[in-house]
Amino acid sequence: MVSEVLPTLHPEVCFQPAPGQVVFAEPATGTSLTLYAISNRPDARITVSISSGSPSAADFKLIKIPSIGLGHYTFKVIVDVKEDSLSLTYSYTVDGNTITLDRAVTVIPRTCQTSEDEFQTVVELQPGQDRADIKIPWLKIDDWQGWVWVRPRNTWIEPRWITLKELPVLLGSHFFLLQPVNSTIDPASSFCVYPCSTAEATVHLTSARDGEEPNTVYARVRRTKADCTAKVYVVGKITTGADVFESIDGAIGMAKQYLGTSNLIYEMPPTHDRGTLWPHSQLGFCTWSSIGEYVRPTNENLARLVKSLKDMDLPIGSFIIDDGWQDIRAGMNGIPDTKGLWSFDIWDGMNISFRESVDIIKRGLPTVENVGVWMTLHGYWNSIASKSPLVAKYKMRPYKLSRDCVPGLIYKGFEMQTCTQPDEKDYIWWLPPKELAYQFWKDYFSVCAAAGITFAKVDDQAYCSFLAGVEGAEEAFALWNGMNKAADEIFGEGRVIHCMAHYERMFNGDIGMGLATNGKRVVFRNTNDFGLPRPNVHRDHIHYNLMNCIIISRMCLIPDADMFMSAAQWPEYHAVLRAFFQGPVLLSDRAGEHDLEVIHKLIGRTRSGVYEVIQAPNTIRPLRSRIWEPTLDSGIGPSIKAASSFPVANSSSVILWSSRDSAAHASTDILFASDIIDALGPEELLPDTKYLLWFNDHRSAMYFNPSLSSGTPIAEITLPPETHEVITIVPSYSIGGTDGIEIACLGLVDKYASLAAITEIQVLAAPECLRTTVKFEGKLAFVAQTIETARIQILLNSDPVSYKVETLDGLSASLLTVDVNSGAGGRGTADAVGWTIDVCLVAPQ
């Protein structure tokens, strides 16, 4: 007899809580804390060393829970927590080799409990006072660590994990979500700090600079409106509940009270305006990466690109002509390489008119309803060319720029903006005076509209914060206000993509809070470009988008995750994120390089025959219970995790992205009952109902009982690098009484946001069935808790239809899939809501 020789895997182990984390335990002598480990080797001997009054050690034991993905193994140990803090050090032994991890877990007993608390500092600039540097005495740098949103680039704000001792001295910080590191503070606390700007002044925070009180946080206030008493507000909220986002809602709520916007209702743009659909309800396309970065569009390459999209039968509904189409001139605004806008026309390299350029797109792609163009808030990268005829027409004059307005930003590599010049006297933009800014934009957009343009992408907006002095700040405000007003009038409401716009007005001020638009939401580019040549750019893009959505989803903004490519640069990894945003879904594929499977997971056809994007109704946010996890570290460890709810379906989705450093290792997690409850929302749970978890990419399912203790492990899941998983969480409904079965609807399983297609779901008594109405064509799936499916009948628009049955191993359940398409149930009329599907239980023969 020959025994099978199994390959020896290089041992990998990760822990929860992770090394370096700070966790708390509830107060009580003898309280226990459960630790978990995940390994690719079942024979790993895993130990935790406990450093306290009497050092000890404990061994992890292998436990059995469902494993999804690569088949890793879960281990568990319980340690006692007394009244003193503990330091836990992990080690593991495999094949005779012992590895001890460097960083320890700190466990803080919750020996002190505090109530919620609020903090505020109001700063007033008196007339004639243009700046102020004010101490924030209640924000102690020794007490807190966590996520801080810092502006490390000219036009982008990004979250960083830091202790407040490491708060940047020069770079501005715009938002804080913190946990305590001081044992005298309730360890269950979360602390949100929000510096709130106004229309009169802006504010951000830094640590102390030379000559200021050391180890102190300062508010940096800049006047943006002359001859008035200008106020800004720095507010903070501490909460001690399990929901860390309560502190965010509290702090933003305080800021709204100061601004007087507590009762302002944020509204989405109209679905139709000026006779066309809102551009971002349909699949979009952008020329930037498709033609080639820094390659100017011509009639030849534009026509070639359009033909490629037509040949692939892609249902593009909106199309953006990105940078390079404008009539620009070089060498007039400083050094020879700088370029400024010359006229409102298209550049002569197109060899055709502006209108004819738009016609190439619309004739070649009949599905395109909206064509947009790119520009910057100051016309072009270096504003208006100083010798342009526009200068005289709009009485333009030079405005000085200064890096002193936004200190700490370091020039690295290629930048197109003027402020990279070495000599500050050359930092000049030519712009219309503030009283003519609106007219400039109205005329510009009118020329665009006459050529067939219906929306715009307005870039480089945050760079206007470099305009020097109060006069420059007023000019920046006038440019944005005039541009947005003119766009609403000429194109329709909400038809500007506000890009490279990470600065105080958006993140912390009157635009983000809805004052500038009277509650009308605007589309806001949520992060930097998706495919920049930087380490970890893809996972960081997901991370930044999700973390920024913690803030942006609570403001008068519609987050835009940027374009992506369907057949290059981790396409599905990016595509799934766009399905859970409310902003544009923009492709930027090169000609002939399209993945139709990826694209069609993002779109669906309605009964009227129109393709629309299929997106979640609520913007995705990180799982609140996992906000402190080290998801970006090296080695195997936790993935990025986020959730989006679908109230109509009484359901939610949890999305995981593999996210380890350099994509060198798999991500692995233990899902707990608390994660599922977090995703569904405790207040939204249906009474006396169990739920089904469907792992879409792994085609695996399991049932979940919400009555389980929050710390109960549900499953282990491991994702290889560059991959993701969508977990669909849906209620299981009973039909047929005591002799009936349970049915759960998964939505359209051939779409990323499968539940977004559902417009109604209910249990009917006559006939006894689960009725689901969907808006789009696709593969509608159900899980029936039975393997005897002969009694199940499915009706599509009241007509019986066939369905595919697949037995789900180990679950005593069946996956039922029915094709909902133009040949099933009929296309219907243009005003039809969708298709109605009844899953019925018929009487036994």
Image: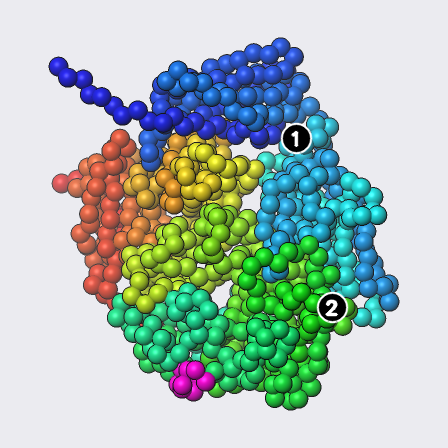
| 30 or 478, nearer to the observer | 478
Q: Cα distance, mark 2 to mark 1?
A: 44 Å
Is there any visible trace of residue 66 in the rendered image?
no
Depth check, mark 2 against mark 1: the one in front is 2
- The correct choice, above or below, for 4 with respect to 318 in the image is above
- Among the two numbered marks 2 and 1 on one chain, the one whose residue lies closer to the N terminus: 1
Is disc 2 placed on a helix, strand or loop?
A: loop
Q: Residue at x 51, y 52 (%)?
A: 545
Is disc 1 placed on a helix, strand or loop?
A: loop
Q: Position of residue 272 (x, y in %)?
A: 46, 73
Tag 1: residue type? Pro
The quadrant of the picture occupied by the N terminus is top left
Q: Is residue 466 left or right of residue 709?
A: right
Circle 1 packing at 10 Å, graded few (<14), some (14-19), many (20+), is many
Quarter-of-image position of residue 702: top left
- The correct choice, above or below, for 223 with respect to 21 in the image is below
In this picture, which residue range is highlighted in magenta?
Answer: 348-357
Question: Badge 1 is on which residue?
Answer: 187
Tag 2: residue type? Ala
Q: Considering the whole magenta stretch, tell me its main secondary structure.
A: helix
- The correct choice, above or below, for 740 with respect to 500 in the image is above
Q: Is residue 844 left or right of residue 543?
A: left
Question: Badge 2 is on which residue?
Answer: 468
Q: Residue at x 73, y 39 (%)?
A: 141
Q: Position of residue 465 (x, y in %)?
A: 68, 65
Quarter-of-image position of residue 531: bottom left
Q: Residue at x 19, y 54 (%)?
A: 801
- The correct choice, above or below, for 567 with respect to 302 in the image is above
Say the numbered circle drawn on residue 32.
Answer: none
